[in-house]
Every structure is written in C-alpha cells, then in structure tokens.
Image: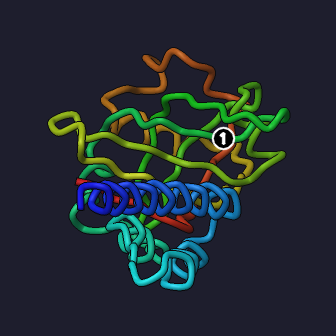
Amino acid sequence: MRCCSDSSKLTSFVRAVRDRFVRRACFAVVGMVGTVGMRRRWVGREWFGSRWYEEPWLRQADRMSDVTSIPATHRDLLETPSAAAFTTVGAAGYPQTTAIWFLLDGDVVRTSLHRSRQKYRNVVDHPQATLFLIDPTNPFRTLEVRGDVTLEDTSDTSFLERLLVHYGQTLETFPAPTDNRVLLTLTPRRIVANG
C-alpha cells in the first residue's frame, strides 16, 4: 500500500515538474518570436494535456496591443511639466536613454533636439523611439509611448520658446544652444499604461 502511494506521489511530482519546464520553455521560445497571438496558441491543450494555462499578463498584452491613443487616465503625466526618459537605438544596436523635456500636442509628443546630440543621430538612423514616464507620486503608475519619429528642420525658435515656457524657462535662461535645432515628433504606435 505504502509503495503505491509513494509511486503515485512521485508520478504527480514528475508530471508537475515536466509541465512547468515545458511551459517555461514554450514561453522562452515564443518570447524570442515576440507575438502574443502565438503565445496564446502554444499555451493550449495540445501542449499541456487537459490543462489550460492563460496567464493574466497575456490577456493584458492582448488588450494593450492596439492602443495608439493616450488614455485619459494617464494623460496628466504628459500634460504636466516633468522630465521623461527618451529611448532611441544607437548605431551598434544598443538602446540609449536620456531625460528630455517635451510637449503634448494633440495625440503626438514633440520636443526640440540639437543636431550635435546622440539622440538626433540615433533617430536619423532608426526613426523609432520610446518615451517613458513615471508618476512622481506613485511609482507604479507609468506610461510608455512607443512610436515613429519624424524630424522637421526649423530655423524658427517658436516651438522651443513654447517648450521652455511650459517648463518655466526662457530662451535667455535656457542652458543649451538654441540654434541648429530640429523639431522631433513622436507619433504613438503602441501605448502601455500601468497603475
């Protein structure tokens, strides 16, 4: 009797370990492919017998995949003057992140870049970027705006003046160069709002 109960416990343990290993391996492989739809298909009965695994983060990722407009719940993060992390991809393929000032203009985000900066060179080569904001009062409330970048030559400083006024500065008090700048527009392609 004892022998049988031990073997059934061992069998259930082996099954649990196998299921866990296979599930993690599938997520790792599919994670490299990067499509949520494939994850949902692979995490089905055909892979795991009679069990159905559907993680909450998969459902959230599916809901968020088509969001390209800024949700009203997080719009204040873009409307209040604060620094945001702006990430571009460098020539070697590594991300480069810097803090920037920005303005929300309708449903696009705009900023002014100097041509000598690494950010400018990065977006000329790879016109995609991410803007990431954290609520200073709640670090779990965040907004990530991934999108396409367009650059516009401007000899006019009117946008730069608007940007500086938003942050309580003027052209005279601004510590960076005001000439040789471009207007950068980030058009959202995917928005992830948490918290």
Q: Which residue is mark 1?
A: 88
Locate residue 104, reporting x and y percent. Answer: 40, 55
Whether residue 77 is situated above or below residue 86 in the rendered picture? below
Label 1 sits on a secondary structure element that is: strand
**Which image quadrant: the N terminus?**
bottom left
**Residue in the foreground of this view, choosing between 4 and 150:** 4
> Residue at the left extreme?
137
Picture quadrant of residue 180: top right
Label 1: few (<14), some (14–19) or many (≥20) C-alpha neighbours in 10 Å: many
Instruction: Name the residue located 62 percent from the left edge and 49 percent from the top edge.
Output: 129
The image quarter containing residue 164 is top left
Q: Does residue 151 appear to the left or right of 185 in the view shown?
A: right
Q: Is residue 157 left or right of residue 62?
A: right
Instruction: Identify which residue is drawn at 55% across, 48% down.
Output: 130
* Total marks in image: 1
Give the side of residue 163 with respect to residue 114, left or right.
left
> Where 145 falls versus 123 (above or below)?
below
What x and y, as percent, mark residue 100? Answer: 49, 33
The quadrant where residue 111 appears: top right
Q: Nearer the viewer, residue 1 or 123?
A: 1
Residue at (53, 64) in percent of width and height: 188
- Where 89 falls versus 26 (above or below)? above
Residue 64 placed where, x, y %?
A: 41, 71
Could you tell me which residue is drawn at 30 percent across and 68 percent down?
Answer: 71
Left or right relative to 44: residue 115: right
Residue 52 x %, y %: 39, 79
Q: How is the image coloured?
A: rainbow
Of residues 178 and 134, the one drawn nearer to the viewer in this rendering: 134
Q: Amino acid at mark 1?
A: Thr
